[in-house]
Structures are given as structure tokens and as C-alpha cells.
Amino acid sequence: MAGTASLGASMSAMTMMDSTAAATTMMNAEAQSNKMQADTINGIASAYQDSATKAQNAAQQTGKAINY
């Protein structure tokens, strides 16, 4: 049958591109998931650090008030 070689090549190429698209979609999703987790952890750590800094500043201000 005429044209079967090019049809087969086209089907093979489409299968390869579909597999590549699926793999890169999963890679991107995994990277975004890891980034979301890291951003959340960093946000929580930053909030704890901010609270600790505020407590330290409050203690220093209280100490200054007592000295005067």
C-alpha cells in the first residue's frame, strides 16, 4: 500500500511526542509541588522568626522602661 511508511513514521513520531509531553507535564507538576512545599515551610519558619523577634523587641522595650 502506498504511503504506509510515512504514515507509520508519523504515528511513531506522534507517539514519541505524546510520551515526551506526558513526561514533561509530570516533571513540571513535581517541581511545582516541591516548590509549594518549600515555600510553605519557609513561610512558617519566617513567621516563627518574626514572632521571636517581636518578643525580643518587646522585652528590650520593657527593660528600657524599667531603667528610666
Image (spheres, rainbow, N blue to C red):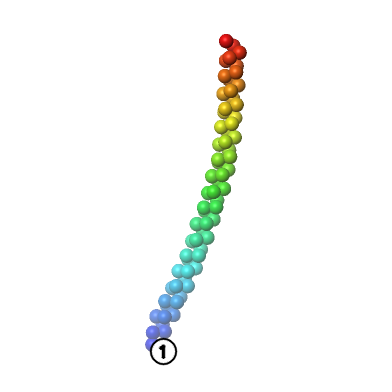
Seen at 38% across and 87% down, the residue is 2
Residue 54 picture location, percent across and down: 57, 27
Q: Secondary structure at mark 1?
A: loop
Q: Residue at x 41, y 82 (%)?
A: 5
Q: Where is the C terminus found, in terms of image quarters?
A: top right
Where on the picture, by quarter, is residue 50? top right
Residue at the limit of the structure toward the bottom, as seen here: 1
Give the residue drawn at x 60%, y 21%.
59
Quadrant location of residue 42? top right
Q: Is residue 2 left or right of residue 59?
A: left
- How many numbered markers are drawn? 1
Q: Residue furthest top?
A: 68
The kind of residue on which mark 1 rests is: Met
Relative side of 59 to 25, left or right: right
67 lies left or right of 21: right
Looking at the picture, how far across and down is residue 45, in whole percent? 58, 38
User: Can you identify the residue that label 1 sits on?
Assistant: 1
Relative to 15, residue 39 above or below: above
Task: Using the image, determine if residue 14 lies above or below residue 55.
Answer: below
| Crowd rating for badge 1 (residues with CA inside 10 Å; few <14, some 14–19, many 20+) | few
User: From the image, which quarter does the N terminus lie in?
Assistant: bottom left
- The image shows residue 55 at horizontal and vertical percentages of 60, 26
Q: Nearer the viewer, residue 61 or 42?
A: 61
Residue 68 vs residue 37, the one in the foreground: 68
Q: Position of residue 30 (x, y in %)?
A: 54, 55
Residue shown at the point (58%, 20%) measured from the top left: 60
